[in-house]
Amino acid sequence: DMPTLLNLRATSHSNLAAVKTELDHSLRELLGPFLCDVPGFLLALANNRAFVGGSIAVAFLLRDLTVKPRNVDIFVPKHSLIDILNHLVTHENAMDRTPPLSEDATDDEFERHVGLEKLLRLRGVGERRRTVTPRGEINLYASLEDDALLPVARSWGTPAVSYVGPHQFGTAFPSLFFERRGLVGSCTQDDTETIGLDAQQDHKSVQKYVSRGFDIRMSPSQWSYRTHGGLCGASRGLCPMQPRRFDDQWAMSATF
């Protein structure tokens, strides 16, 4: 598993090189089914300080062949969306299939569109594009900030707060992630429609991760071995609502 590999590479220069080779190969194998030019894609990510999240990142970190990603989710800084989109169009024959709001949209469709846009912004996404290549679906998420990982940090729950890039990878809640446990978080405000859409999206995500063997809970105290007298999980970095960083004492952040 990943923790074992990271410990192994610290034991010698030869093991360091062997683990790097294995991790590089693993990432390229996961991206290969969706991309014609994986090296070129990774270079584009590096040049734009972008990362891959979603199922690709989870499969890479878990090193589990049973996790079968259905698409690639790319997270980019707020000003890098067009650069990555142009790369996909030019080098991967991608077509932008982002569904527009129809001029004939009903009031309900319009309200739902506005609600989804609001939800995306609450999740840290300034703009989203859905592209389709001859090999599959690639989704682009432009951050509201210069940090591409803001939308990842505001994901539905702890398992999805994971990422992998050309040079770096990590997960914010490794003590839960590698035990296939997860906590649900929410970034919604007091807006009835947005809360409803948020709940729908979260329910789908929870179902997907449960099918992958994750035990998803609302609070760390729901696992008896983690209650510690009912203390708040924030003391151990296990509260999805507490301020965190991807490089803090509880996170796992590593380089290839």
Image: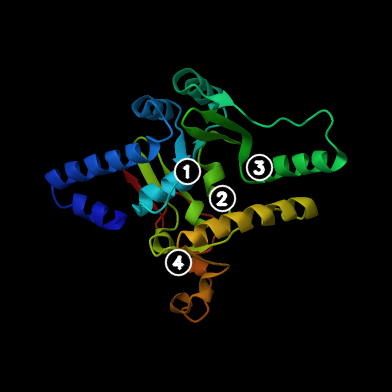
Q: Position of residue 42 (x, y in %)?
A: 38, 30
Q: How crowded is mark 4: few (under 14 residues within 10 Å), some or many (20 or more)?
A: few
Please, is residue 59 above or below residue 209 in the view? Answer: above
Which residue lies under the disc numbered 1?
A: 53
Q: In this view, does 149 lie to the left or right of 188?
A: left
Q: Residue at x 43, y 48 (%)?
A: 68
Can you tell which quarter of the image residue 166 is in?
Answer: top left
**Quick one: label 3 or label 4, which is nearer the N terminus?**
3
**Quick one: label 4 or label 2, which is nearer the N terminus?**
2
Q: Determine whether label 3 and label 4 are within 8 Å by CB.
A: no
Res. 120 mark: 3
Q: What element carries label 1?
A: strand
For badge 1, the amino acid type reads Gly
Which residue lies under the disc numbered 4?
A: 236
For badge 4, the amino acid type reads Arg
Closer to the observer: label 4 or label 2? Answer: 2
